[in-house]
Amino acid sequence: MSTASCHREHRPLRGLYKDRENGWIFGVCAGIAEFANWRPATVRIIALVSLVLFFWPTVLIYAAAALLFRDKPLTYAGRCREYDFWRRHSHHDRWSHS
């Protein structure tokens, strides 16, 4: 039995997203790091330095990014059998409670 993860609908994400799973406050730095293919620690250090040097512009830009960036969509990384089971039964008529 294979334990490899199943990525059938995995497409690369385009654009900037908030990554709340890997983020600290709102996930803005983690999202920017993923978009630019950098380490999140590097983006956080840049944000902290700019916060010390340019407090109000950094706060305004971070707040705007937290409001405007969409949340990163969730992706399934489990076994293919489980993925197929839940995809098959999620929209099946007999599972609905009407």
Image (cartoon, rainbow, N blue to C red):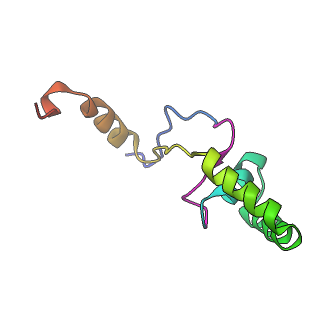
**Residue 19 on image: x %, y %:** 60, 54
Question: Residue 98: image x %, image y %?
Answer: 10, 30
Residue 95: image quadrant is top left
The residue segment tinted magenta is: 13-24
Q: Residue at x 13, y 29 (%)?
A: 94
Q: Nearer the viewer, residue 77 or 95?
A: 95
User: Which secondary structure dominates the residues rendered in magenta?
Assistant: loop
Residue 16 sits inside the magenta stretch? yes
Look at 75% across and 55% down and name the residue there: 61
Residue lying at the far right in this picture: please name it.
53
User: As drawn, which residue projects farthest toward the bottom?
Assistant: 52
User: Residue 81's x, y, as percent?
Assistant: 34, 39
Could you say where residue 28 lies in the image, as x and y percent from the top left? 66, 56
Name the side, left or right, on which 62 lies relative to 54. Answer: left
Q: Residue furthest left?
A: 98
Question: Is residue 95 or residue 27 the one in the foreground?
Answer: 27
For image coordinates 29% across by 36% down, the residue present is 85
- Depth check, front residue: 42 or 98: 98
Magenta-colored stretch includes residue 32: no
Closer to us: 56 or 51: 56
On screen, 44 above or below 91?
below
Query: Could you tell me how many numbered marks the image carries?
Result: 0
Q: Residue at x 59, y 33 (%)?
A: 11
The quadrant holding residue 30 is bottom right
34 horizontally vs 9: left or right: right
